[in-house]
Image (spheres, rainbow, N blue to C red):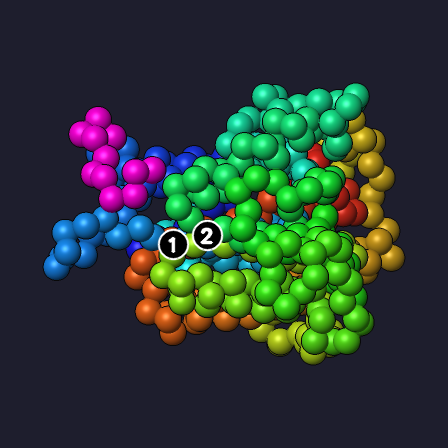
């Protein structure tokens, strides 16, 4: 695998993908000298025998509300180095590169994801109200010109699997060959807007409540099928894979519902700012300065949420292992770039906030 990137920043990843696209925009033409230094780390491989540009595949995996402190960082920051994603650590973090000091531009779902898709800072796509606005985003500045559209124009077969944006478009945005998307939806009996998926009708498709239809599993199965077909057709592919985990309501798969290894943390990380005094919060903005101390009951709820978030990520770990395993099985692992991040983080008790995101202070 040429690069497996663990980046908790969406603009950074968007920039990397666009740089990769720029270097391949002529599909076989050597980038000009003026581009060579900037693209050095991301340049596609050449085959020694043919001396031609070998266009790499791209897999982009985006989780929801997964953060560094609560079991999302690589290397793990949890006590004892525990992680809900050991396969991901082995396959991506240990085998690739990761960035530690990067920051999400906007700590909430749709604005953050829109910066990724468009490659633009949030203030350039922001719209608080009026036609076309939703969750403070002007979607007309996002859906029509994504990095996916640009990769598609460069010859990629493209697929979207899982959460796209909180406000779904009425039609499939340009550039997506396969579309299996929703606004996050439900963990059980999930519903997806479908286009170009073999064996499924066009439009909205709702799955049954069978355990095998757990949302992360369905997204993983569809992703693997898309990758297998694209490789079989001999075309470079871009798979955008976005499971619901670890977003509320924090529902693990049935087979992980009661799982808790003795080596895993007994409760959420409790740094100095966890349930901290009012005096230590003076000067902080808004409700943070006035939050009361957490009660024992509130602390118990927070710990339960922490454990269930962890359990939802066990299924994401399985998904990533299946995807990487399929790419390796089909002989494309050394020609595939894998990017992995969350859309933003989450807080559980930091600054006395029981659970939330959208705050500007580090946990």
Q: Is residue 259 left or right of residue 28?
A: right
In the displayed structure image, the side of residue 271 where residue 36 appears, left or right = left
- The one nearer the camera, 349 or 166, is 166
Q: 310 above or below 63?
A: below
- For the residue pair 184 and 251, the one nearer the viewer reads as 184
Percent x, y of residue 79: 55, 61
Q: Tell me what residue is drawn at x 79 percent, y 71 percent.
A: 208
Q: Residue at x 42, y 49 (%)?
A: 156
Tell which circle, 1 or 2, labels the residue nearer the N-terminal end.
Answer: 2
Q: Which residues are magenta?
A: 25-35
Provide residue 253's location: percent of width, then percent of height. 71, 71
The answer to whether residue 33 is magenta is: yes
Which quadrant holds the C terminus?
top right
Q: Is residue 271 magenta?
A: no
> CB under 8 Å between callouts 1 and 2?
yes
Where is 195 relative to 326, above or below? above
- SS of the residue under disc 2: strand
Rendered-image quadrant of the N terminus: bottom left
Counting from the top left corner in percent of width and height, residue 222 is at 59, 65
Q: Residues within 10 Å of mark 2 (few under 14, many from 20)?
A: many
The residue depicted at 50 percent of the width and 58 percent of the height is 76
Residue identifier under label 1: 236
Q: Is residue 48 left or right of residue 271?
A: left
């Amino acid at each position: 695998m040429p690069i497996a990137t663990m980046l908790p920043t969406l603009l950074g990843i968007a920039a990397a993908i666009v740089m990769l696209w720029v270097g391949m925009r002529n599909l076989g033409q050597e980038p000009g000298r003026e581009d060579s230094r900037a693209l050095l780390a991301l340049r596609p491989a050449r085959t020694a025998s043919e001396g031609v540009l070998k266009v790499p595949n791209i897999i982009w995996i985006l989780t929801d509300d997964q953060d560094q402190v609560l079991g999302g960082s690589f290397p793990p920051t949890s006590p004892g180095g525990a992680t809900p994603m050991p396969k991901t650590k082995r396959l991506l973090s240990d085998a690739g590169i990761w960035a530690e000091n990067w920051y999400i531009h906007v700590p909430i779902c749709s604005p953050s994801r829109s910066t990724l898709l468009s490659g633009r800072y949030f203030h350039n796509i922001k719209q608080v109200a009026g036609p076309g606005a939703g969750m403070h985003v002007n979607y007309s500045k996002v859906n029509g010109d994504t990095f996916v559209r640009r990769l598609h124009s460069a010859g990629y077969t493209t697929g979207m699997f899982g959460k796209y944006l909180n406000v779904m478009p009425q039609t499939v945005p340009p550039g997506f060959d396969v579309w299996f998307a929703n606004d996050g939806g439900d963990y059980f009996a999930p519903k997806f807007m479908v286009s170009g998926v073999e064996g499924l009708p066009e439009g909205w498709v709702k799955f049954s409540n069978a355990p095998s239809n757990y949302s992360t599993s369905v997204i993983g199965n569809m992703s693997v099928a898309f990758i297998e077909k694209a490789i079989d057709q001999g075309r470079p592919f871009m798979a955008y894979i976005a499971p619901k985990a670890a977003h509320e309501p924090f529902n693990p798969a049935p087979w992980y519902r009661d799982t808790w290894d003795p080596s895993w943390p007994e409760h959420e990380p409790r740094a100095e700012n966890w349930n901290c005094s009012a005096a230590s919060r003076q000067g902080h903005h808004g409700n943070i300065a006035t939050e009361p101390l957490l009660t024992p009951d509130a602390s118990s709820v927070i710990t339960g949420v922490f454990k269930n978030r962890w359990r939802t990520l066990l299924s994401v770990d399985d998904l990533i292992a299946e995807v990487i395993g399929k790419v390796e099985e089909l002989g494309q692992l050394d020609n595939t770039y894998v990017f992995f991040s969350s859309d933003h983080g989450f807080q559980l008790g930091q600054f006395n906030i029981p659970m939330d995101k959208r705050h500007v202070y580090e946990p």
